[in-house]
């Protein structure tokens, strides 16, 4: 996973790569979803322990090889766009926005597909609107 992260950082636009290098902390665990990005208030920089403007990117070690770079870039896109996944103020279009940005950076795979990325949110929204 470390080499995949390095590869993605090199492929990103320079300003985004510098942002990810300085503001994102990556961990890789078995999670059950490809990835997740959380705001810095629950993470800290490994060296200076700052939390402000830091992002914790959690990656699933089981991401297929052909999806790993797009997944990493998609999670970096969430951080770049300041998508706070634990806030009630997160935009409804967050997954679509991250997918489109990831695609604009030249990545491929499910992390760049707005329909694929938005499907869980649409399903949740539809199930919450079903009358019992």
Image (cartoon, rainbow, N blue to C red):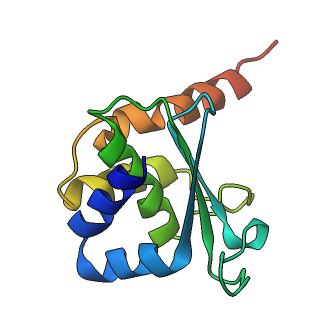
Give the quadrant of residue 48. Answer: bottom right
Residue 56 in the figure: left or right of residue 8? right
Residue 90 in the figure: left or right of residue 75? right
Residue at the spot 56% in from the left edge and 32% down from the top edge? 33
Residue 84: image location, x then y, percent: 64, 63
Residue 100 in the figure: left or right of residue 26? left
Residue at the spot 60% in from the left edge and 28% down from the top edge? 32
Residue at the spot 66% in from the left edge and 75% down from the top edge? 46
Residue 75: image location, x then y, percent: 47, 54
Name the residue nearer the viewer: 67 or 84.
67
Residue at the spot 36% in from the left edge and 34% down from the top edge? 115
Residue 121: image location, x then y, percent: 57, 35
Instruction: Say whether residue 28 is visible.
Output: yes
Tell me if residue 18 comes above or below residue 64 in the rendering.
below
Residue 15 in the figure: left or right of residue 83? left
Tell me if residue 100 comes above or below residue 116 in the rendering.
below
């Amino acid at each position: 996973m470390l080499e995949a992260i390095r590869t993605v950082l090199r492929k990103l636009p320079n300003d985004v790569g510098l942002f990810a290098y300085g503001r994102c902390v990556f961990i890789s665990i078995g999670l059950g979803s490809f990835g997740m990005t959380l705001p810095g208030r629950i993470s800290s920089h490994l060296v200076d322990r700052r939390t402000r403007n830091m992002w914790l990117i959690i990656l699933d070690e089981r991401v297929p090889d052909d999806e790993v770079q797009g997944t990493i870039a998609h999670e970096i896109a969430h951080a770049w766009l300041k998508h706070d996944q634990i806030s009630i103020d997160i935009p409804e279009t967050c997954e679509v926005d991250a997918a489109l940005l990831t695609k604009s950076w030249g990545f491929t795979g499910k992390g760049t597909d707005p329909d694929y990325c938005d499907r869980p949110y649409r399903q949740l929204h539809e199930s919450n609107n079903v009358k019992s």
